[in-house]
C-alpha cells in the first residue's frame, strides 16, 4: 500500500475499506454502485462488524476504483496466493506425482466497445482476457495476466517464470516450438496436444498397456524445417483413447521419465481450469464491472481473485467439509454479524460460552492477521 501511495491524501475511504466494500460486493453479488451504496446504508449500525466504518457513497467508491493503483490489490492477492500455496503444498489431485503441476489457459470477457474503448478487440467489440496459471494442488490461480482480447494466448509463455521440475499443461493454442524450447531449457516439463499437421520422424517406440486406453508411446524428432530449427531436441509422443468418450488424443511432452498413463492423466486435469473459469463467472462479479476505466477493471478482477483465494484458505485452514460455493453463501449472510468464522461455517454450533483466547477471528481480523 505504501509502495503505491494508496492512502495519500485520502480522508473518507482508505484502501483497506475499499477492499472490504468491494469484497462485500463480490460476496453478495451486487449489481451496481447504486446497489452497493443502498445495501450498505440499509445495514446501518452493523457495518462495523465487517470493518467498514461508515456507509460508502458510490461517487467516493467510483473515484477510488478509478484512481487508486490496482497493483495494491494485485500484490495483496499474491500474498494470499503464497499462503494458499503453502497450505495446499501436499494436496492430492488425482495423479501420483511428486512435482507441482499447473494448468495454463485463458478466458475472454466481452465488453461494450463504447464504454471500454481501451479494451479494443474487434471492429465493433471490446474484450479482456484473463490468462491464468492454475495450480492443480488446490485449484486456485497462482498467476493471472490481464490483457486486451487481441493478445494471443501463446504470447503469455514469454511472461511466465517457470519452476524447474514442475509440469505445465496447456492446449494446442500454446503450441509454439520456439517458446516451448525456451521453456524446456528452464528445466520444467510441458504437456500439450499435437496438431493434425504435426510432422515428425519416429526414433523409438515403447511398450504400452493398451487396456488402459494408451495407443502408443514414442520418442520423435520434428522434421519440418522451421519447427525443427525451433525445437531441435527429441519429444515424447503419446497416443491415448479416452475410454469414456472414445476420443483419440495425441500428447507431446518433454518428460521421458513419468509413465505414459500419468502424462495422459495430467492432461485430463487441465479441464479443472475450465471449471475454475466457470465458477468465478457464476459466483463472483467478474463478467460485469462497476467502473469503465482500465484501473477500475483491473482492481475489480484482482479483488475477486483475492476473495476466491481467501475462501480457499478458509476451507483449508479450518478443515471445512463445505464446498467453496457453500462457504461463499454463508459468508454473504454473516458479513455484518459478530460471529466467529468457524461457528458460522461449522455444521455443529459451537458452545455459547467460550474463553476469549479461543475465539476464532471474524473476517476483518482474519484479513489483517489479528
Image (cartoon, rainbow, N blue to C red):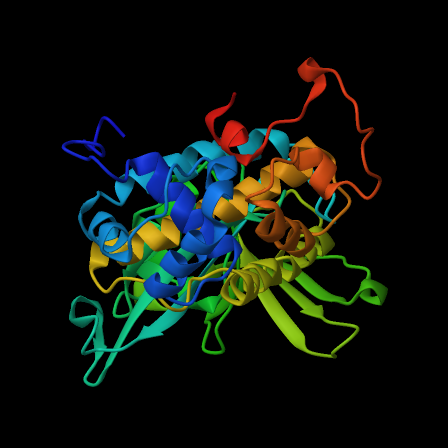
| Picture layout, residue 354 above or below residue 339 | above
- Decide if residue 265 is in sight here: yes
For the N terminus, give its image quadrant.
top left
Q: Image point 50% across, 39% down: which residue?
A: 50
> Which quadrant would residue 92 be assigned to in this image?
top right
Q: Image point 36% across, 47% down: which residue?
A: 55
Q: Image point 28% across, 35% down: which residue?
A: 14
Q: Residue 11 appears at what percent x and percent y?
A: 20, 35
Q: Residue 294 appears at what percent x and percent y?
A: 22, 58
Q: Residue furthest left?
A: 9
Q: In the image shown, does 350 or 179 lie closer to the viewer?
A: 350
| Picture layout, residue 310 above or below residue 233 | above
Q: Image point 58% across, 32% down: which residue?
A: 362
> Which quadrant would residue 335 be assigned to in this image?
top right
| Picture layout, residue 276 above or below residue 240 | above
Residue 143 shown left or right of residue 84 in the figure? left
- Decide if residue 233 is in sight here: no
Q: In the image shown, does 101 or 124 lie closer to the viewer?
A: 124
Q: Residue 130 appears at what percent x and percent y?
A: 38, 59
Q: In the image shown, does 173 or 341 lie closer to the viewer?
A: 341
Q: Residue 91 appears at what percent x and percent y?
A: 69, 38
Residue 38 shown left or right of residue 111 in the figure? right
Residue 361 shown left or right of residue 299 in the figure? right
Amino acid at each position: 500500500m505504501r509502495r503505491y501511495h494508496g492512502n495519500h491524501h485520502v480522508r473518507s475511504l482508505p484502501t483497506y475499506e475499499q477492499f472490504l466494500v468491494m469484497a462485500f460486493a463480490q460476496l453478495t453479488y451486487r449489481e451496481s454502485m447504486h446497489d452497493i451504496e443502498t445495501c450498505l446504508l440499509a445495514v446501518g449500525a452493523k457495518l462495523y462488524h465487517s470493518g467498514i466504518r461508515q456507509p460508502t457513497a458510490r461517487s467516493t467508491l467510483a473515484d477510488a476504483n478509478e484512481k487508486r493503483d490496482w497493483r495494491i490489490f494485485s500484490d495483496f492477492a499474491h500474498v494470499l496466493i503464497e499462503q494458499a500455496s503453502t497450505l495446499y503444498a501436499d494436496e492430492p489431485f488425482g495423479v501420483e506425482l511428486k512435482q507441482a503441476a499447473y494448468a495454463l489457459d485463458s478466458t475472454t470477457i466481452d465488453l461494450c466497445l463504447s464504454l471500454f474503448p481501451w479494451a479494443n478487440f474487434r471492429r465493433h467489440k471490446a474484450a479482456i482476457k484473463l490468462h491464468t496459471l492454475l495450480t492443480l494442488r488446490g485449484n486456485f490461480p497462482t498467476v493471472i495476466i490481464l490483457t486486451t482480447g487481441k493478445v494471443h494466448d501463446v504470447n503469455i509463455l514469454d511472461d511466465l517464470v517457470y519452476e524447474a521440475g514442475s509440469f505445465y499443461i496447456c492446449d494446442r493454442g500454446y503450441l509454439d516450438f520456439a517458446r516451448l524450447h525456451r521453456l524446456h531449457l528452464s528445466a520444467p516439463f510441458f504437456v500439450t496436444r499435437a496438431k493434425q499437421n504435426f510432422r515428425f520422424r519416429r526414433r523409438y517406440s515403447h511398450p504400452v498397456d493398451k487396456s488402459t486406453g494408451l495407443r502408443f508411446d514414442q520418442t520423435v524428432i520434428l522434421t519440418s524445417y522451421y519447427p525443427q530449427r525451433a525445437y531441435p531436441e527429441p519429444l515424447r509422443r503419446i497416443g491415448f483413447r479416452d475410454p469414456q468418450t472414445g476420443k483419440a488424443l495425441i500428447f507431446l511432452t518433454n518428460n521421458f521419465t513419468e509413465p505414459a498413463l500419468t502424462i495422459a492423466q495430467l492432461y485430463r486435469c487441465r479441464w479443472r481450469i475450465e471449471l475454475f473459469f466457470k465458477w468465478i463467472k457464476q459466483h463472483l462479479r467478474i463478467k460485469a464491472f462497476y467502473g469503465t476505466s482500465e484501473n477500475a477493471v483491473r482492481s475489480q478482477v484482482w479483488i475477486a481473485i483475492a476473495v476466491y483465494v481467501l475462501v480457499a484458505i478458509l476451507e483449508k485452514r479450518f478443515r471445512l467439509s463445505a464446498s467453496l460455493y457453500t462457504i461463499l453463501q454463508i459468508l454473504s449472510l454473516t458479513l455484518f454479524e459478530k460471529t466467529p468464522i468457524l461457528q458460522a461455517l461449522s455444521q455443529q454450533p459451537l458452545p455459547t460460552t467460550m474463553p476469549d483466547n479461543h475465539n476464532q477471528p471474524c473476517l476483518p481480523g482474519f484479513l489483517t492477521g489479528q
